[in-house]
C-alpha cells in the first residue's frame, strides 16, 4: 500500500530540526479551534435555585412587583 506524503520538500536540504519545526507548525495550524464550552443546563443553574434577597425600605412593596 503506497501512501502519498503529506509534506514534500521542493527545494533545499532541511535538517532534522528544521523539518520537525515545520511539522510542528503545520500540525498546530491544522488542529483548528477548540469547540466552545457547552452551556450548563438551566436546571443546574444555582442562580435559579437561590432566592434573591428581599427589598427593604420605603417603596419595597412596589419594587416587589416589578420584573427583575
Image: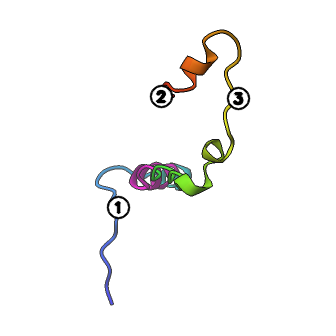
Seen at 33% across and 90% down, the residue is 1
Q: Secondary structure at mark 1?
A: loop
Measured as percent of width and height from the top left, residue 38 is found at: 50, 54
The disc, 2 or 3, on the residue closer to the chain's N-terminal end is 3
Label 1 sits on residue:
7
Determine the CA span between mark 1 and mark 2.
61 Å
Q: Are marks 1 and 2 in contact (CB under 8 Å)?
A: no
Q: Depth check: 17 or 49 in front? A: 49
In this picture, is 37 found above or below 61? below
SS assignment at label 2:
loop
Checking the image for residue 67, the label placed there is 2
Which of discs 1 and 2 lies nearer the camera? The answer is 2
Is 2 on the left-hand or right-hand side of 58?
Answer: left
Q: Residue at x 70, y 12 (%)?
A: 57
Q: Residue at x 47, y 28 (%)?
A: 67
- Find residue 32 and report its horizontal and vertical position in percent: 41, 52
In this view, the residue in front, 43 or 56, is: 56
Amino acid at each position: 500500500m503506497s501512501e502519498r506524503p503529506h509534506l514534500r520538500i521542493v527545494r533545499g536540504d532541511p535538517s532534522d530540526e528544521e523539518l520537525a519545526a515545520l511539522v510542528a507548525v503545520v500540525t498546530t495550524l491544522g488542529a483548528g479551534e477548540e469547540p466552545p464550552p457547552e452551556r450548563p443546563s438551566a436546571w443546574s443553574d444555582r442562580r435559579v435555585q437561590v432566592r434573591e434577597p428581599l427589598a427593604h425600605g420605603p417603596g419595597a412593596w412596589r419594587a416587589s412587583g416589578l420584573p427583575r
